[in-house]
Image (cartoon, helix red, strand yellow):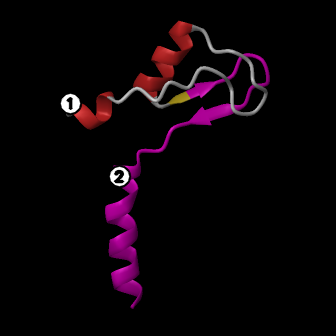
Amino acid sequence: MNEESNINLNIDKCPHCGEKLSPWQQILLNVDRVLVCKNCWYRIIIDDINDDNPNKSNNNEEKA
């Protein structure tokens, strides 16, 4: 694993309902990049910016 994948985003609450995430939920979110809030069942997804950029630039070049 590279250092970029180990970056901790410090998300400590659900962005939808504001429920505080437990330390274990924060670890799961940083490892799996996806977590479902136990309070409101909102799916928290962390997108990796580095994975999206190469695909978007290739799609723009193909359309042009």
Q: Residue at x 79, y 24 (%)?
A: 40
Q: Residue at x 46, y 15 (%)?
A: 27
Side of 10 where 44 appears, left or right: right
Badge 2 amino acid: Asp
Dot 1 falls on a residue whose secondary structure is loop
Badge 1 amino acid: Met
- Image position of 4 with respect to 37: above or below: below
Residue that mark 2 sits on? 51
> In front here: 53 or 41?
53
Q: Based on the picture, tell me whether residue 26 belongs to the magenta stretch.
A: no
Label 2 crowd (10 A; few <14 / some 14-19 / many >=20): few
> In front here: 28 or 8?
8
Side of 3 where 35 appears, left or right: right
In the image, the segment drawn in magenta is 35-64
The quadrant of the picture occupied by the C terminus is bottom left
- Image position of 61 with respect to 39: above or below: below
Cα separation, mark 1 vs mark 2, equals 14 Å
Dot 2 falls on a residue whose secondary structure is helix
Residue that mark 1 sits on? 1
- Image position of 63 with respect to 43: above or below: below
Q: Residue at x 68, y 26 (%)?
A: 14
The quadrant of the picture occupied by the N terminus is top left
